[in-house]
Each structure stands twice: as C-alpha cells, then as structure tokens.
Amino acid sequence: MDDFLHECIGILNRCCKVNEEDLNFFELSLEDKSHSHSILFSLLALVLVANPREDVAAVTAYQTKQEGITVYFTKNDLSQGTINHVNNLKALVQTTALDPQVTLQKFHELFFEIIVPYCRGKIFRRLEEMRKRLEVTKKSDNTVNSTFDDLLEIYHRFQSDQTPSYNAKGHADKEAIRLSASNDLFDGLCEVLDSVKMEAACDLFNITPRDFVPLAAHAYIVGYASINTVIAKSSVNLLPLLRSLQKVGDYFRCATRLFRAITESPLSRRRFAELKVVAIASIAPIERDLNMNWMLVLRCLWHRRTARPFPITKGQWLANHSNGMALYEKHRKQKFVAHAELTLMTAIVEDHRRLPTVIGVSKACCGFCTAFVNGVNQYRDQTKLSTWHLPGSHGNCYVCQLPSVSDRSLLAGVAQLKEYLESKVVDLITKAIPLFMSETPPQWSSSEGSETSQSPTASFYPTTKRPLSKDWGSRK
C-alpha cells in the first residue's frame, strides 16, 4: 500500500502555516549563537540568494592545517551564475587577506559592488518591505504601537527618562552611540531611524551599491539594537517593522563579520589567502500526482498511527482547513524540491566523508528539515558522536523532497522525518475534533424522508391562524 508520504507533505504544506514574525524568533535573531560560525555562515548563504522567492542557499566550511579553509555551498537550484558569483567573492576575500591596505570601508565598497547586482531581486524585495513598514500610518484613536512614529516616540521617551542610563550591550548599540552628537544611545537611535526613512525614499530597485551601504548600515543599527527586545515584549505589533530593518541590515552585517574574520590575525589572513570553494550540485526536483481522495489519506494515516476509529467527519475537517484543501485539490501535480541544507548535509557525509559541523542557511529551516536533522543528531548522540548545528526553524512546511541516502545516521534522519510527517497529520486530525460533540451520529437516526418510528410526529400540534398571546412565554 502507498504510504502517502507525498500526500502528507502536500496536506501539511496547505494546512500548517506559522507566523514567522513572532517574539521568540525575533529574540533569537538578536542572540549570538552558541556556535559563532552559525551567524557568519547563514549571512554568507544569504548573499548567494538572487531571486526574491523560493531561492535558498546553504553554506559550511572546514579548516585543517593541511587543507586550510574549504567552503562548501549549494542552493535549491544551483546555477553557473551562482558559481561565478561565489568565485568573485572568493577573489575579493583572497585579495583582502593579502593586502593589509584594504580597510573595512574599502571592503564594504568592493563587497557591495559584487553583492548588489547579483542579489538585486532579493534585496529589492527586502527594501520594499522595509519601506512599506516605515510608511504605515494609523488612525488617531489607535493606541497600539505599530508604526515608525511609535518606535521613534518610544526611543525619545527612553532618551528623556531620568532613570539610570541603559547600558550598551552589543555592537549595534555602540554604533548608535558613535552617531549621536551627545554620545547617547537613544539619541543615536532616533537619528539613525530618521535617516533610514529618508534614505529609503528613493528608487529602490535601481539603488546603487554606494547608496545601499549606508542604508544597510543604518538599518542594521536600528534592527539589532538590544533595547528592541524590551520594546517588542510590550509592543508586539512593532515586530514586523523591526524584522524588516534586520533583514536589510543583514547584508551590512555579513560584510562586516566577513572582514573581521579575514583580518583577525596574521594566521587568519594566511588561511583566507588560500581559500578553497566547493560547489555541491543541487538535486533535480521530482513531480508527483497526489491522491485527491484526501479523506482516504487521512483515514489510513490515523488508523496506522492510532489503531482507533476515525474520529471526525469530512465537514469537521473542512471546517478547519477548507482553504488549504481547496489549494490541495487545485494542484494535483506537485514539484518536490530538495532543500539546500539537506543536500549539503548528505553530500558532505556520503561524498566528501566529512564529520558534522555548523551549517548556515539563508533562511530559517522548515519543519521537515528540522525533523530530519533532529533524527540524525539523536542517532549520533546515542553513539557519542558529534552532531550538526543549523539555524532555528520557523516551523512552516514546504513541499520538500525526501533525501535518498545510505549512511546510517542519515537513514535515521529519514525515519524521523517520516515519523514527523505522520504525527503532524494526526495532530491536525485531533485538533479538528469538536470540543463539544454536539452532532448526532448518523447511524442513530434515519433521514427525515423515511417513515420510521424514530421520525418525529409533528401533526400532534394543530396549526393556528391567530398570533400567540404576548404573555405566552410567561404562563405557568
């Protein structure tokens, strides 16, 4: 019997959507990861993304005395254009490592001359989103903090507060202080936030590298100011604005962190001067015709997982997922894409025989990839082996292709992924069970058209041609 795994993926893709702009995800973006390479690798993956949507990259690196630094990279759909782009970045890194005269400001200039033309589609989408958030207005009687003016007012309020000053906690805070005439964090944030809005009022699609650098730098300062964690807890509706600033600032963040890594020491310069890059070919998508009898799919999965009678009707399922199932039925043929992080993992293990390390991804991992990595790590934990480290997960479910693998740890990941798929569908079925079962089971009653002893005899009560007395309801 078909295990319905592709149908599981299709149903979850249509019925499981998570809001990425939640507080936990925002706070995670501000934290330094336990594995510091995770930030840089994810930012490097970001600058390999050209298209505004459905373009994801994954990056990792290994360093040995014999081989120096070797960077491995791939994408959901790796092209020769991306490989050429990576080689341009490699040349810049090697030049910077060899030339002590290259300053951070000069590196920014050279870096963005490479990045902006290649990443223009993705950058423009992020800039447009940021400008839209900056221009949001609200009615005068709306007191919920959600706009540029609200954030600016909050910064001014902190600035005028007479309580002890807020200590700078991160690099973005220190940069805001440097840009303040009074060396005050909140004065600097006000100045920078105003500047971002003015700089974004231009032809964003045709923005030049020279104009993009200060805009990205200022977006980074405001987006990653540590006080934003305090603000976000009391003003959750400001999260979309703050996240849009972070997403633009990430390009500046990438350039700065990369330069620091290259120039950290004479040894790091020597290693980066001999940098090697290895492209991992992407896996071709596969197409599947999904089973349109999705009630059969749900019933089979439920019985397989629980061995109990199916608990809901078709109507009860559609009451919760009508829009999702309409999309499922509309798109019978689905393309299942191999996600970049899984492609990179499997190639590193099975082709290059490397041990687990940190992998950076240009966006947070989906629920499927997270389940796979968790399965691999659980297997390796049991045998006291090293584990993989990836960025956080947004929990959304996309039409992901299951990896074809032979390594035992990777097979454990596939098994965990299958377990995750089925359990998520069972969870959705369970949540669709009405809290109060008020529907009469159909086998307890015959249709009103049939004449049985169970049919109600309404003719006991004669009709009337006059209205009921007004005090009828109060009669005893």
Image: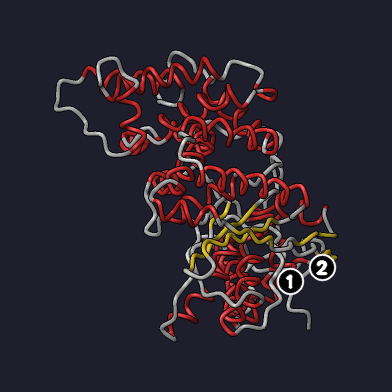
Between the C-alphas of marks 2 and 1, the distance is 8 Å
Q: State yes or no: discs 2 and 1 in contact (Cβ < 8 Å).
A: yes
Mark 2: few/some/many CA within 10 Å (<14, 14-19, 20+): some
**317 relative position to 24: left or right:** right
Q: Amino acid at mark 2?
A: Asn
Tell me the quarter of the picture where residue 13 sits.
bottom right
Give SS at disc 1.
Answer: helix
In the rendered image, residue 65, in percent from the top left (x then y), is placed at: 47, 69
Instruction: Please indicate whether residue 408 sits to the left or right of residue 65 in the image.
Output: right
Q: What residue sits right under mark 2 in the picture?
A: 291
Q: Label 1, on which residue?
A: 297
Residue 116 vertical position relative to residue 429 in the rendered view, above or below? above
Coordinates of residue 295 in the picture (x, y in percent) = 74, 68
Q: Quadrant of the N terminus?
A: bottom right
Identify the residue at image location x=27%, y=39%. 169
Name which residue lies at 65% across and 80% down: 303
